[in-house]
Image: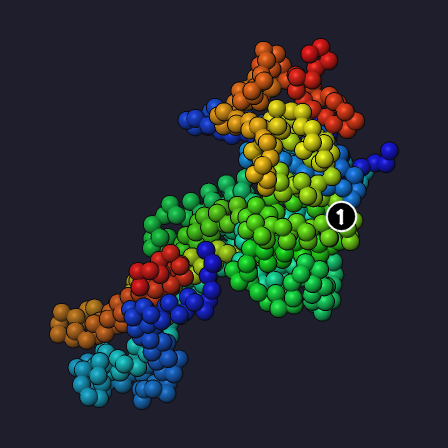
Amino acid sequence: MPEPLLRVDDLSMVYQRRAGLLGRRAQQIRALNGVSFSLGAGETLGIVGESGCGKSTLARCILRLLRPSGGRIRFDGDDLLALPDEGMRVMRQRMQMVLQNPFSSLNPRLSGFELVAEPLRTHTAMSRMEMADRVASLLAEVGLGVEFMSRHPHQLSGGQAQRTALARALALNPDFIILDEPTSALDVSVQAQIINLLLGLQRQRGLTYLFITHDLSVVQHISDRIAVMYLGKIVEETSSEAIFANPQHPYTQALLSSTPVPDPAADRQRTILPGAVPSAANPPSGCAFHTRCPQAMDICRAQYPAARFVARSHRVSCHLYDESA
Amino acid sequence: MKVEVGSTLWFLLRDRAAVISAAFLLAVALAAVFAPLLTPYAAQGMGDPDLGSKFTAPGIKHPFGTDGLGRDQVARLMFGARRSLSMGVLVVVAAMIIGTPLGLIAGYLGGWVDEALMRVTDVFLAFPPLLLAIAIAAALGASYVNAVAAIAVTWWPWYARLARAQTLSVRERAYIEAARGIGVRHRVIMRRHVLPNILTPIVVQGTLDVGTAILVAAGLSFIGLGTQAPYADWGVMISDGRLYFLSGRWWLSTFPGLAIFLTAMAFNFLGDGVRIAADPRLRRVL
């Protein structure tokens, strides 16, 4: 088996927060708790979960915008956490990120040209003329004309702004792009356009995507594999088809049943989860999902279920699938 | 907060107090720059005495009267404006140039750098500002340049604090993280992404401060630590005239006093106008 492009092993991230009078009580927030997955070149992995499950922390740890507390991240054979700062800075040419809201991720003072040229300015010695050519072709690639070079973010629509952000991410021909809820801030009609654009770019450039979202219906069209996260852990990971056809984890089942299906005749049983996501500062014992799980057993309160394979490349962490059960 | 220079200007022009203030300040500045062309007594403005006409009361020939050496007070005021205005502006510009980068670096880097820089500013802020300026000006020796330096030294910590506070909020914006993700160096992030986005409140504060800086500079000149004879600024003129004020020669201190009062007030109105015009949330008041 070839080495995957990205391999994340047992990644943990604990935020320390000082609380109480004079900050004497230290509070620990486990945003990531032993997250492992691998992602082959040209593939798309969807990370799905509710807000607060650690999916954005995961993105920031992979790009080393945050220092994980433990675990390993290998990108194309390099241990990202062992790279010196300058080495990591250079490595960032190959891995880019697109954030949720383009109006906050684009500096309001810069023009379209300056925004898209910034990666070129940072990592190459291009002249201004070369940059202008390159920026024009990047904008064309995301479906924007040259007139967008002189537009500032507040003069753009949501879709145009996100296209600008995408052109910026593509500027250095990266291998890997983390898409952190890239469509969540956009209108539904625009969402589809951006998803199609992402799919086209992936085909042409052989890009690898990590697509983070809370919306299963969005990720379905673009992902080869999907990992479902709950309170800092991946609870189920399998192919995009299998997760819709044959969800195993009760949380995945509940997520799926909350996704609208555009067929009024569809016969569906809805699972409504009681309560809200527990706080990561004070996670439940055992399986963190047991407080809301309709099928919780005694063992769920005591012990976290180890990941096991219920089918080829279908990984689940749930006591329902223990060998003894 | 999105700020466009064009729209800020447009809203500023609708603020009557700001427009009148700006016009007044422009007139004062033009009078200062073109003083030699505007007054027949240019040499007296520079300090030459005309003992034959000393202590002339305001009249047709000398609208604001003459001083103890017979110098035309209008000419003195116009030449004095050169120093008083430039001192106020230079103090604020110097304080901004020193304070803004330090505050930006402290706020952006945080940690011990922040701690160290902010403790240094605390030391400066612990002294009463005028007293510190007097001490420094006295230690450096009385002169125009030293007075500017002395006041700027007491002033920059305010800009450092303001820049730091603004940086702390801008630092958390998504576009800073996006730039880091691209691999932009911290130095470039500070210059390209943070600085332009913290500048508006700093410029507003600067406009408000020029008036106060002129007052402080006049204060130093008043006690003899600023502009030196034979040149004059408004502070020196008040100081020279104060001995004669109660003996009937009221015009000596009154006109420079009015000049300081009106100029400082105009800068305050203008600064307030800029502050409101630059902040879309405040524009509704107009």
The one of A90 and A143 positioned closer to us in this rendering: A143
Residue A178 quadrant: top right
Left or right? Give the position of B181 relative to A224. left
Left or right? Give the position of A129 relative to B279. right
Residue A239, visible in the rendered structure: yes
Which residue, as the protein is rendered here, is positioned at the far right?
A1
Screen quadrant of the C terminus of chain B: bottom left
| Residue A128 horizontal/vertical position (percent) | 70, 67
SS label for mark 1:
loop
Residue B241, visible in the rendered structure: no
Is B28 placed above or below A55 here? below
Q: Residue at x 24, y 69 (%)?
A: B257
Is B194 placed above or below A61 here? below
Which colour scheme appears in the figure?
A: rainbow
Q: Amino acid at mark 1?
A: Leu
Q: Residue at x 57, y 61 (%)?
A: A110
| Residue A158 horizontal/vertical position (percent) | 55, 55
Chain under disc 1: A
Is B75 placed above or below A247 here? below
Screen quadrant of the N terminus of chain B: bottom left
| Residue B217 horizontal/vertical position (percent) | 35, 64
